[in-house]
Amino acid sequence: MSKFRIIEPVGDFAAVTGSEIGIGALVVANVLTQDPRKVYRVADASALEIELDLGATPPDADTVGLIGATFSGSGTWEWREAATQGGLSSPTAIISGIVGRQADRDNPRGEWYNSRAELPGSTRQRWQRITISDAAAGTWQVGRLILGLGLQFSREYQGGWDEDLISLDALATRAGVGAATVAGAAYREVSVSMTSVPPEEWRAYVDLLNRRGETGDVWAFRDFTDDDTITEGSIYGLLTGVIGRGAGPRQRVTRKYQQKITVAELRP
């Protein structure tokens, strides 16, 4: 039995810039869209920087990560933050050497990777920088950059998880990302069930559901630990389905003896 965690991406950013020019329409702004197929892709690079300006009032965040990233086996990345853009050269905080190719049980084809790091505390500085480094220069891409706040459930979920294939067109329509026709991609709905979730955690989840609805993206971890070297069966997608017993939208906010959370996958 394992614990479940949901990362909620934080608000709109004042600006995002990249150190390399994207190929055609595959520009750096794509990392902030919830369609992971709209990527930031660069050619012949051995280092790449992505900077975020969080604005005058930075939102809280305790996790940073990359969705649908492609690096070589020697690739790493680092995160740093500072109160001013110039301060990024001597940052307030830094996390180095995050492995670009993490073990991900949900990506058996090995064509792309999800990678994350837990940040010190949740209070953020205005300027954030992600620096990707790879000894093997090549064409790299990032599908989604996540800066988010995590909801950690203290209860373990029972009986593993349920996985079902889903309608690609229906999911794409709900996500607003157009036709979902990626050859060979496996799109799934993943569900976990928990019993006797503490009321404060369930209220926090209901608040998250009200904010994200069924069209806002989340990043969920089905076997979460504090080990940043593996992604513990992560799934990036949309909250969906019935929560608790019964059917219909009203049941989503009803706390029953057993709670069910379902995420529909969005995949590069």
Image: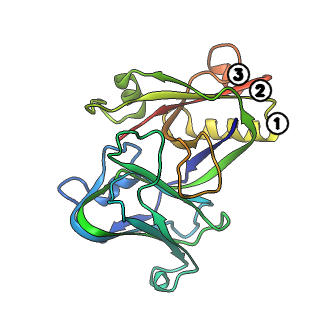
Check disc 1 and report its element: helix, strand or loop: helix
Q: Which residue is mark 1?
A: 199
Residue 107 falls in image quadrant: top left
Residue 134 falls in image quadrant: bottom left
Compute the Cα span from label 3 to label 2: 7 Å
| Residue 201: percent from left, percent from top | 76, 41
N-terminal-most mark, 3 or 1 = 1
Using a 10 Å C-alpha cutoff, classify the residue at mark 3 as few (fewer than 14 neighbours), some (14 to 19) or many (20 or more): many
Residues at circles 3 and 2 in contact by the CB criterion of under 8 Å: yes
Check disc 2 and report its element: helix, strand or loop: loop
| Residue 164: percent from left, percent from top | 48, 21
Residues at circles 1 and 2 in contact by the CB criterion of under 8 Å: yes
Q: Quadrant of the C terminus?
A: top left
Q: Would residue 6 be found to the left or right of residue 254 on screen? A: left
Q: Which amino acid lies under the numbered mark 3 shown in the image of this protein?
A: Gly
Q: Which residue is mark 2?
A: 255
Q: Which residue is mark 3?
A: 244
Residue 133 falls in image quadrant: bottom left
N-terminal-most mark, 1 or 2 = 1
Q: Which amino acid lies under the numbered mark 1 shown in the image of this protein?
A: Pro
Q: Would residue 117 be found to the left or right of residue 152 on screen? A: left
Residue 142 vertical position relative to residue 129 in the rendered view, above or below: above
| Residue 108: percent from left, percent from top | 40, 39
Residue 115 vertical position relative to residue 176 in the rendered view, above or below: below
**Render colour scheme:** rainbow
- Residue at 80% of width from left, 23% of height from top? 257
- Residue at 34% of width from left, 24% of height from top? 169
